[in-house]
Image (cartoon, helix red, strand yellow):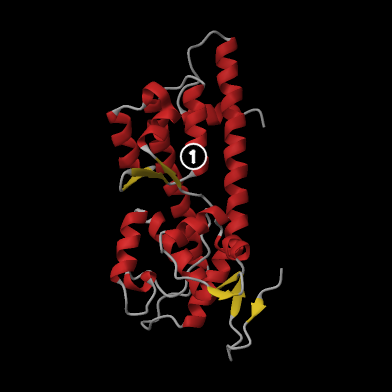
Amino acid sequence: MAANENPNDQHKQREYRMAELAAEAGITVRTLRFYRERKLIPPPRREGRIAWYNKHHLARLRSIAALLERGHTLGGITELLAAFESGRDVGELLGLGATFVTPWSDETPVRLTPEELADHYSGDSTAENLAASLDIGYLAVDGDEFVHTSRRLLDASTTLVARGIPLAAVLEAGRAVRTHADAVAAIASTLIRTHLVDPPTGTPPTPQDIDHLAHTVEELHPVFQAVIDAEITMAMDRRVRTELDCWLRGETGGGDGEQAARAGGADG
């Protein structure tokens, strides 16, 4: 649907309907409604029964996504917004910059009561596992509820526990995966910083420089995603073949990851 142009705005500011704004911000309409109910974004402009949102709402949603990524809870973000009345965006308040790169992650936070959280993991909902989830950053406390950072990770961990893997083992594996994922992200960001960002000149970048970098990083998102997906799937193929060979020979395991990778890669 084409964006609406407000005739009362001499700058012809672009506006979005709710579904359009949610899609542009990479969140669901349900999440957008939740943010609006929590007053995390300002009220939309009303035209009859239609609500119109603008670029300031989009910037605020991207600010919220960046704050969640940095570990802030929704409750903490609400407090920041309540205290911030000078007209600047919360991203400016925290030094996040005026221009945001579209988040690569499209994860949707999930709010859970303690009872709902316990239902996901049955008898594995122990104090130790809860502490580990908070420490890793999967869970945050917001009032009387929990906020899980990712619907997909919540669903995955629930399935793994239901199949018989202890939650403590799932969380330990998640911590290890997080470490390796951070290392992969560091490799990607180093490539961008080294080869696509001009060396420091002693002067701050212009808004045009920032916009160019943001556009470049956004364009490379599917490229890096494709590389990661390809490498992970090929690594799983190598590992599964190695584990299967060990099992057929009556051995107890496939050895460490490096040995398994070499053995699997030897087949070509």
* Residue 72 seen from this side: no
* Farthest-out residue, top: 250
Residue 204, image x and y in percent? 39, 81
Q: Is residue 105 left or right of residue 67?
A: right
* Farthest-out residue, front: 48
- The amino acid type of the residue labelled 1 equals Leu
Residue 80, image x and y in percent? 31, 65
Residue 110, image x and y in percent? 46, 45
- Secondary structure of the residue carrying tag 1 is helix
Q: Is residue 157 left or right of residue 80?
A: right
Residue in the image at 51% along x and 54% along y: 31
Q: On screen, 206 above or below 51? A: below
- Seen from the viewer's position, the closer of residues 177 and 72 is 72
Quadrant in which the N terminus appears: bottom right
Location of mark 1 (residue):
153
The image quarter containing residue 137 is: top left
Q: Is residue 122 left or right of residue 21?
A: left
Quadrant in which the C terminus appears: top right
Q: On screen, 179 above or below 124? A: below
- Seen from the viewer's position, the closer of residues 223 and 151 is 151
Residue in the image at 65% along x and 28% along y: 267
